[in-house]
């Protein structure tokens, strides 16, 4: 199956939702009663997006003052109820809870008989696919995993950022049209992810987004140690160009000492870090090694240029033990 998103021209509401067995097969677009568990950064925003698409958000769950504040702002007038009551009143349940609570919540709701045959359900976790929803599926709930690839702060500004945001979609093949319709309705672009690839999908995004933040913060700290007052000013043009190059040309965008096989410079970096920022040595060695391996694999470095680099990094690792 292609994982290419539908074209923007398809951004109308196709009449696929009645296929879920929920709705009258009328010509009018389906209007679902939506329940949001819980009203966190993601849930409150997706609830607002579904309301904007014409659905009726009937209840939300959330005990903390943060959830109550977000619900009041993004889901005005929507009552806050316990999760089982939210499920009982909804055609479509959005489960936007921390990854580690998802399994227990779905199972607990199944044990109390909360799920109803014919309901729609999606969770928003990147780390999970469909397996975590199995107890609801067994109760006859059409279950989907719709992961928005976006960072959410839980404010109204997130709604704008949803426009054309990719959503990782995992569903049974026969439910794919329902999943894609919901994503399009929320303003996103569906990207198909097979159940077996879900773990790798999340690793990739964490590597790209979370580790990038760590790398940037690390570079900024090293510049501060070098006496630079405003590291962001120095880094912004370079890092923006590197990001754009990496996205467009992958390994071919690589510049710097590893791309030139410049062993002397890498050895000097290791010496400097050992003296001035020893806690950064391990990360530098790991990234330099991976950069070298990728440069070799992509033809940016020849074997006789890469081997001395790998030998140097082996020695540095050995010395650190
Ligand atoms: N934040 C992001 O940028 C982002 C992006 C994409 C995907 N996601 C995914 O979206 C999901 C939600 O993340 P989030 O950032 O929105 O989390 P969050 O801001 O911490 O909100 C979590 C919500 O779940 C509720 N909750 C926690 N445990 C619960 C339970 N056992 N039963 C019922 N409700 C419970 C919380 O309610 P209380 O108020 O009662 O604590 C809160 O409303 C996660 O799977 C996350 O990986 C997050």
Image: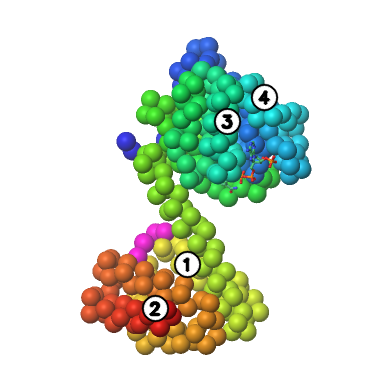
Any mark on residue 85, and which? Answer: 4
In primary-sequence order, the first of circles 3 and 4 is 4
Distance CA(mark 1)–CA(mark 3): 49 Å
Q: How many marks?
A: 4
Return the residue at label 3. 108
Is disc 1 surrounded by few (<14), some (14 to 19) or many (20+) residues within 10 Å?
few
- Residue topped by disc 2: 317
Observer-nearest of 258 and 6? 258
Specify whether tag 2 is near ligand 1 (CB below 8 Å). Answer: no
Asked if marks 1 and 3 touch (Cβ < 8 Å), the reply is: no
Q: CA distance from mark 1 to mark 2?
A: 31 Å
Q: Which residues are magenta?
A: 247-251
Local SS, label 3:
helix
- Mark 2, Cα crowd under 10 Å, few <14 / some 14-19 / many 20+, is some
Q: Are marks 1 and 4 in contact (CB under 8 Å)?
A: no
Q: Are marks 3 and 4 in contact (CB under 8 Å)?
A: no
Corner quadrant of residue 37:
top right
Q: Secondary structure at mark 1?
A: helix
Residue toward you, 110 or 146: 110
Residue of label 1: 241
Disc with the residue nearer the chain's start (1 vs 4): 4
As drawn, 192 above or below 211: above
Q: Position of residue 205 (x, y in %)?
A: 46, 53
Q: Nearer the viewer, mark 3 or mark 4?
A: 3
- 230 displayed left or right of 294: right
Q: Quadrant of ligand 1?
A: top right
């Amino acid at each position: 199956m292609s994982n290419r998103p539908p074209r923007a021209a398809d951004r109308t509401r196709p009449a696929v939702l009645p296929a879920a067995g929920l709705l009258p097969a009328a010509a009018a677009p389906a209007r679902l009663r939506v329940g949001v568990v819980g009203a966190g950064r993601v849930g409150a925003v997706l609830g607002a997006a579904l309301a904007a698409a014409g659905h009726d958000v009937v209840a939300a769950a959330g005990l903390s003052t943060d959830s109550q504040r977000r619900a009041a702002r993004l889901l005005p007038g929507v009552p806050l109820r316990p999760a089982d009551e939210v499920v009982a009143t909804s055609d479509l349940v959005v489960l936007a809870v921390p990854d580690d609570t998802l399994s227990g919540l779905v199972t607990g709701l199944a044990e109390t008989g909360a799920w109803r045959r014919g309901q729609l359900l999606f969770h928003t976790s990147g780390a999970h696919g469909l397996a975590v929803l199995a107890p609801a599926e067994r109760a006859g709930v059409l279950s989907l995993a719709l992961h928005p690839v976006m960072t959410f702060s839980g404010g109204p500004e997130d709604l704008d950022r949803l426009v054309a945001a990719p959503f990782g979609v995992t569903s049974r093949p026969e439910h794919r049209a329902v999943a894609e319709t919901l994503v399009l309705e929320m303003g996103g672009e569906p990207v198909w992810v097979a159940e077996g690839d879900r773990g790798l999908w999340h690793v990739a995004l964490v590597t790209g987004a979370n580790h990038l933040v760590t790398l940037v913060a690390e570079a900024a700290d090293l510049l501060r140690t070098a006496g630079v007052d405003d590291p962001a000013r120095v880094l912004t043009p370079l890092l923006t160009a590197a990001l754009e190059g990496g996205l467009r040309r992958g390994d071919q965008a690589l510049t710097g000492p590893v791309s030139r096989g410049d062993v002397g410079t890498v050895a000097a970096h290791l010496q400097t870090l050992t003296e001035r920022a020893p806690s950064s040595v391990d990360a530098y060695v790991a990234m330099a090694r991976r950069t070298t391996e990728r440069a070799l694999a992509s033809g940016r470095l020849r074997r006789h240029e890469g081997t001395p680099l790998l030998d140097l990094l082996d020695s540095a690792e050995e010395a650190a033990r």
